[in-house]
Amino acid sequence: MPIQHAAIFDLDGVLTDTAELHYQSWQELMDQLGIPFDRQVNESLRGLSRPESLEVILGSRSADFSDAWKQDILRRKNENYIERVRRMTPADLLPGVENLLRALRERGVGVAVASSSRNTGLVLERLGIRPLLDVVVDGNDVPKSKPDPGVFLEAARRLALPPARCVVIEDAAAGVEGAQRAGMRVVGVGPAERVGKADLVRKRVAEVGIEDLLGLFDEGTA
Ligand SMILES: [Mg+2]
């Protein structure tokens, strides 16, 4: 029987805490460059692309640096991050994720990952969950970052489902907005100040129950 519904997961901050690895990469690089950076600045990068993140970090200093310099920094940031990703293991899955993915599959619900990150494939391989996923769409497939809805719409297209039959699990405000622009219901993971616009809010992914997702499917088809 073809799948009737699907859960589309964001990657960073939902399946694994790559946000911490991004933070460590930016911190190491900015320390080397003598540019102020801390966890508070890092928090404001959630959901932003790499070039957008660099602009936020540089702030008013941005005009002092050439595009070539910025490109070099972005390349070094990514190399540093990928080194850290290569050391990831299945133990880096956030608590509750694997059980939730397996429970969805047992119910015949499609499971997808939709992330703006171009390193999605490598992260999923390191986490060992690729066999549990029906569809993966990432920043290589859809270059526009969230809140553009493209990455979610492409996931729905590959699942052969209309957006109304998909529920998204997201931890970033930009991701919640992107999912809603795609016409999908959203579970926001994190504080209400960040993801309060979602249809349902849970503090952490371990608190997202399969009933929560099935309930949103029912609303979508009611
Ligand atoms: Mg995220």
Image (tube, rainbow, N blue to C red):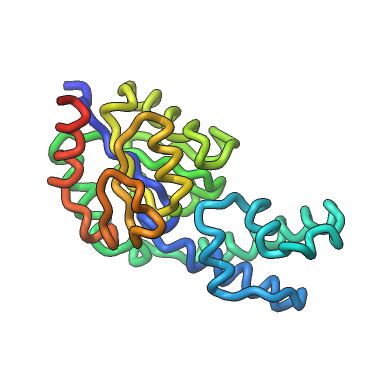
**Rendered location of residue 201, percent (x, y):** 27, 53
Q: Is residue 5 left or right of residue 94?
A: left
**Rendered location of residue 52, percent (x, y):** 65, 52
**Is residue 31 in view?**
yes
Q: Quadrant of the N terminus?
A: top left
- Front in this rendered view, residue 117 or 131: 117
Say which quarter of the image contains residue 73. Answer: bottom right
- Front in this rendered view, residue 121 or 59: 59
Compared with 174, 150 (above or below) is above
Please tell me how many numbered marks the rendered image carries.
0
Q: Residue at x 20, y 54 (%)?
A: 99
Q: Is residue 180 left or right of residue 105?
A: right
Q: Residue at x 44, y 45 (%)?
A: 175
Q: Residue at x 45, y 64 (%)?
A: 88
**Is residue 128 in view?**
no
**Rendered location of residue 117, percent (x, y):** 53, 47
Q: Residue at x 71, y 56 (%)?
A: 75
Compared with 90, 146 (above or below) is above
Q: Quadrant of the C terminus?
A: top left
Q: Is residue 144 left or right of residue 121?
A: right
- Front in this rendered view, residue 40 or 111: 40
**Rendered location of residue 2, percent (x, y):** 21, 22
